[in-house]
Amino acid sequence: MTIIRKRFTHTLLPALLAAFAGFAACSSDDDAPEPPKPSGYDIYTAGYTTPASKAVATVWKNGQLLYTLTNGTNDAWAYAVCVSDGTVYAAGYERQGDRIVAKVWENGTLKYTPGAPGADSYAYSVFAANGSLYTAGSEESGGALTAKIWKDGDALYAYSVSPAVSQARSVCVSGGDVYAAGSLQSGLTKPLAVVWKNDKAHYTLSDGETPAGVNALCLSGRTLYAAGHSGGAAAVWKDKELLYTLTDGSSYAEATAVCRFGHTLYTAGYHTDGFEEEGVVWKEGQELFDLSDGPGSGSMPYSVAVCYDDIFTAGTIFGTTRTAVVWHGDEIRYTLSDGTGHSEAYSMYVVPLYD
């Protein structure tokens, strides 16, 4: 089995990322009143397990296995999950021989293989809106990776042409507009953090002096928040302006997920501490807490969702094996595997429940 190293925007190969994930009814709108407080939650997570020698794309619900999306013949990973009207969608990719094939699943069954035949393709984020399913990722074109958005399995937008290299890490939809974010690199220049709107570049968030990229988007009312990294520091942007530099740059850090509840912005990510990655949640740009690594030695969150006082994150703790977990606050709520093989949780979607 191939395990991809944790730091994910340094390469243009598949990456560990936090897809945009949140609450179906607790997502915030600038002008909307806060929703009622839920009586409970259904927590969906996506990632992989290694029951044998190969990675198996996996979806869990409330800490229990819900779907094994692949049969273990090839390495496969689920990088995104979302839920719409009770239907569970997941996106990721499978290594088939010397090719990488993007895949989208519905309720555990393959629904789309969106990439072009014969070209490597990667699916990193999925978003259901207006009766359609949008997927963000990358596809090989002319010898370079090109950021792509697919709608219902068909190519909708491509965001660069060879020799430029781009990747779409996150997608969200509002009304008739599609927003995507990731990175764009042309020639020998450093990667730029970019947000696209429909078929065009919307914001270029970095100046090209240092490497930068976006890992996650959160659309709140008419305001777009992006989380990622710039110059080795974890960063959050509000529309086209830098909002927070979450770390001081003394050690490498990235913001991997962002969400907003009420008038408060929450970000998850990590910073390096010696040889370990340490997971962190920030509130309004200030560190709120470190995430427990339990018996492990380091942690990394890839997704965050907040409703009132409940803060959920999903990700990985590191040790002799990698273990997928969900945190509630700073403590581990669910351990998603038994520790006999590697597992990681790359995405989370939380559905509030009401009596």
Image: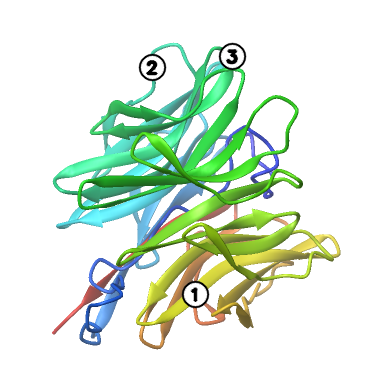
User: Is there CB contact under 8 Å for labels 2 and 3?
Assistant: no
The residue singled out by tag 1 in the image is 266
The residue singled out by tag 2 in the image is 116
Q: Is residue 60 above or below residue 92?
A: below
Dot 3 or dot 1: first in sequence order is 3
Q: Quadrant of residue 296?
A: bottom right
The residue singled out by tag 3 in the image is 143
Q: Residue at x 32, y 64 (%)?
A: 222
User: Is there CB contact under 8 Å for labels 2 and 1?
Assistant: no
Which of the two residues, 335 or 11, is positioned nearer the viewer here?
Answer: 11
Q: Quadrant of residue 247?
A: bottom right
Residue 86 locus on image (x, y percent): 17, 57
52 displayed left or right of 31: right
Q: How many marks?
A: 3
Disc 1 is placed on an element classified as strand
Residue 284 locus on image (x, y percent): 54, 80
